[in-house]
Amino acid sequence: MDKKISEIFLNSLFEYDGYACHCEKDIENVAPGQPPKTTLKLYSDINKPLHFSYAPRAGLNLTGPAGGIIEKNILGKLLAIPDNNIDKHIEFFETYGFLLPIKNDEYESVDAHALMEIVNRIKATIHLMNSIAGQKNYTNILIMTTYLLFSLPIKLELAESSYTTCNHKFTSLLYTYNLFPDLSRNQEVFNNGTYSVQDTMLGKSNPIDIGFYNAIRSGQGTELEGSKCEQYKHLVAMYVGLPREDENVRQIIDFFFHYQTEVGIFNETDYRRISYYGHPKRENFTDEMKKSLLNIARIVISEEINHNIAGIHPIYDVNEFAPSWQVSNLLQALYFSIFYMKPGIEIYKECKNPNCKRDKFFLVEATRTNKEYCCVQCSRAAASQRFRNRQLDR
Ligand SMILES: [Zn+2]
């Protein structure tokens, strides 16, 4: 452990103090044929205080009391937790403490699935920032943006605090909005059989066929596979019925209306994939849609970060006699680190060594496209692996 006061400590933008925690796993079989429900039982260990500090380029680090780095790049460690692997999540929380303050003298119960969804949202936000930087991966951008917008908010109730994931305005509308305006006496409908919607993606008004509108409204559906699905129905209602909605929400509505009407209607959306009702017509994913998707991704990232750092306050530190930030939990510290990441300048990259045990997700300047390994050891290990494979191929 490095005991000398490091440069990082002196340059830190914010700090956070927490405790390591202990975590047990309760597995309950609820119903025959159903997967068991896993509940985590957690308590914090006040004998194991943890000190985190954030510095530009170095990211969020676990530091000793004198500022030496014990463990660097905590955000990268979180990204490296394998998806849906509860034991690896537990390992992370036992080492770096829980996301929110928990009691030290009694168990707090947290649903394992809800907790992993919260972690997935943090990962998705970072992956989304990476995907819009440099060479853009539109499939990833679509999956991550859709995941963050289409999943219902998750709530954690703890003894002394509670937390809800970001509830985007679009998300609440998507699950509830069912008001189809009555267009039967509309002049345009009478004259042309269409109703024009001012469309932010097309930058002009878009005439909607009244037969299509009525078929969606009545639940009868059209030849579009999945057009009877409730979320798509709500989307059409929003597209036609909310012309004066906030500009950001309107952009999101317009994009998903076009994407789902022209490419394919979503059946299920989750952190890593989207499934469609029919076979998606990917050739209809136009440059215009991609441009609009980039804007939406930026809106979603901002809303996610703003929601999660809203509890952080500036304070004037009496002892240091300097300005500082009051960061009250690990979740805020993680999102505050994302807040300070420079989009398009710094990105997280996955080390190309499949057996990497060091810095699997490392922070690097976006322009350094040739840096593929987290460290020299990994690059050497991969090179000798390639050499061995060549020997075997002979
Ligand atoms: Zn590595």
Image (cartoon, grey):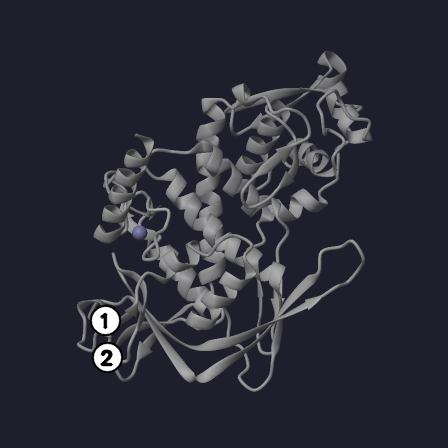
Q: Is residue 323 left or right of residue 175?
A: left
Badge 1 or badge 2: first in the primary sequence? 1
Q: Quadrant of residue 11?
A: bottom left
Disc 2 marks a residue whose amino acid type is: Ala
Residue holding disc 2? 66
> Dot 2 surroundings within 10 Å: few (below 14), some, or many (20 or more)?
few
Q: Residue at x 51, y 71 (%)?
A: 100
Q: Is residue 145 left or right of residue 153?
A: left
Q: Which residue is mark 1?
A: 9
List x then y, in percent, for residue 64: 28, 77
Rendering coords of residue 338 (x, y %): 38, 55
Q: What residue type is disc 1 on?
A: Phe
Choose top left, top right, bottom left or bottom right for residue 173.
Answer: top right
Q: Quadrant of the N terminus?
A: bottom left
| Number of the front mark, 1 or 2 | 2
Task: Name the secondary structure under disc 1.
Answer: helix
Q: Nearer the viewer, residue 374 or 6?
A: 374
Seen in the picture, residue 206 relative to 4 is either above or below; the reply is above
Pointer 1 and pointer 2: residues touching (CB < 8 Å)?
A: yes
Mark 2 lies on a secondary structure that is: loop
Quadrant of image for the C terminus: top left
Q: Is residue 71 above or below residue 238?
A: below
Residue at 40% across / 45% down in the picture? 129
Q: Is disc 1 surrounded by few (<14), some (14 to 19) or many (20+) residues within 10 Å? A: many
Nearer the observer, 295 or 10: 10
Residue at horizontal 32%, vertical 57%? 358
Residue 332 position within the rendered picture, expressed as x and y whole percent measured from the top left: 44, 65
User: Is residue 341 visible from the viewing direction of this image?
Assistant: yes
Where is residue 105? Give x, y as percent.
Answer: 56, 87
